[in-house]
């Protein structure tokens, strides 16, 4: 009976109790302050990281207007229109991968060269007679552009919730200029975004054309 009580008593003893009472482990105010500093530093870094990735809309909203910004953000029906064909070829982008990147490219104010903003006497951005040579750096020209669509439109619609009217913007793929379809103003995408945007939209157009050729 005594032995069983001894075994039971021993089983209730924490075998690691000596580690909790190790005199070498000391909690000091300096250690607590260091731990707090690490936690605060990590929180600040996380906040700055989120802020850096957040889409900046101040200047882009001023250029596009709140309705167009809402359309780009929330449009659940997005159509790419090839202005180089007659009749214009329309491609449904709603379910296409990469649509989120396209939205962000158009929304973030850091993706534009705001010094190129023109807001008077612009006219149709996709008009073949419209001269943009004085606004375009020749080094930006695409030598293969003659065989590709040089200008497209994007139409954003919200038929389900009707949060905004159907909104169309024009994109000149060679020069990188974009603007509302009413031709009221234009601005150029920056050198980093411009080729990526041109490449993505040209791939979509070529893919659609190959599908059409295969059906024929």
Image (cartoon, rainbow, N blue to C red):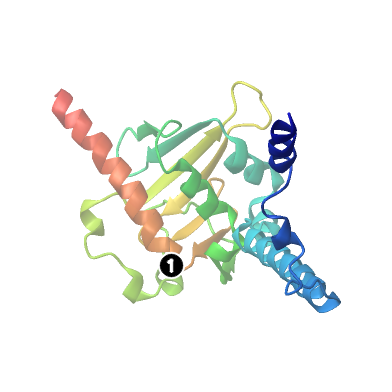
Outermost residue on the top side: it is: 160
Residue 118 shows in the view:
yes
**Residue 44, percent from left and from top:** 72, 66
Query: Image check: 142 left or right of 55?
Result: left
Q: Position of residue 160 (x, y in %)?
A: 61, 21
Location of residue 53 by image quarter = bottom right
Residue 27 drawn above or below residue 7? below
189 up-or-down from 103: above or below: below
- Please tell me which residue is depicted at 73% across the width and 39% down the height of the picture: 6
Q: Residue furthest bottom?
A: 30
Q: Is residue 199 above or below residue 137?
A: above
| Residue in the image at 73% along x and 68% along y | 22
79 left or right of 22 in image: left
Front position in the image: 25 or 186:
25
The residue at which mark 1 appears reads as 192
As drawn, which residue projects farthest toward the right? 29
Question: In the image, is 4 to the left or to the right of 175?
Answer: right
91 or 17: nearer the viewer = 17
Quick one: 72 or 10, which is closer to the camera?
A: 10
Q: Residue furthest front?
A: 2
* Dot 1 alpha-carbon crowd within 10 angstroms: few under 14, some 14 to 19, many 20 or more: few
Seen from the viewer's position, the closer of residues 27 and 92 is 27
Q: Is residue 143 left or right of residue 72?
A: left
Q: Position of residue 136 (x, y in %)?
A: 41, 71
Location of residue 73 by image quarter: top right
């Amino acid at each position: 009976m005594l032995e069983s009580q001894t075994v039971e008593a021993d089983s209730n003893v924490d075998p690691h109790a000596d580690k909790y009472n190790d005199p070498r482990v000391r909690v000091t105010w300096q250690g607590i302050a260091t731990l707090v500093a690490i936690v605060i530093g990590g929180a600040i870094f996380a906040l700055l990281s989120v802020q850096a990735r957040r889409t900046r809309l101040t200047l882009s909203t001023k250029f596009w207007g709140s309705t167009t910004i809402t359309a780009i953000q929330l449009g659940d029906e997005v159509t790419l229109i090839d202005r180089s064909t007659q009749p214009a070829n329309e491609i449904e982008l709603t379910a296409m991968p990469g649509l989120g990147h396209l939205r962000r490219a158009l929304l973030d104010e850091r993706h534009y060269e705001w010094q190129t903003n023109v807001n008077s006497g612009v006219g149709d951005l996709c008009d073949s007679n419209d001269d943009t040579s004085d606004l375009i750096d020749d080094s930006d020209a695409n030598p293969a552009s003659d065989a590709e669509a040089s200008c497209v439109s994007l139409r954003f619609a919200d038929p389900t919730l009707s949060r905004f009217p159907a909104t169309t913007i024009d994109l000149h793929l060679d020069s990188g200029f974009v603007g509302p379809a009413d031709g009221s103003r234009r601005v150029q995408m920056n050198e980093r975004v411009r080729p990526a945007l041109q490449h993505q939209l040209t791939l979509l157009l070529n893919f659609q054309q190959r599908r059409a050729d295969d059906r024929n």
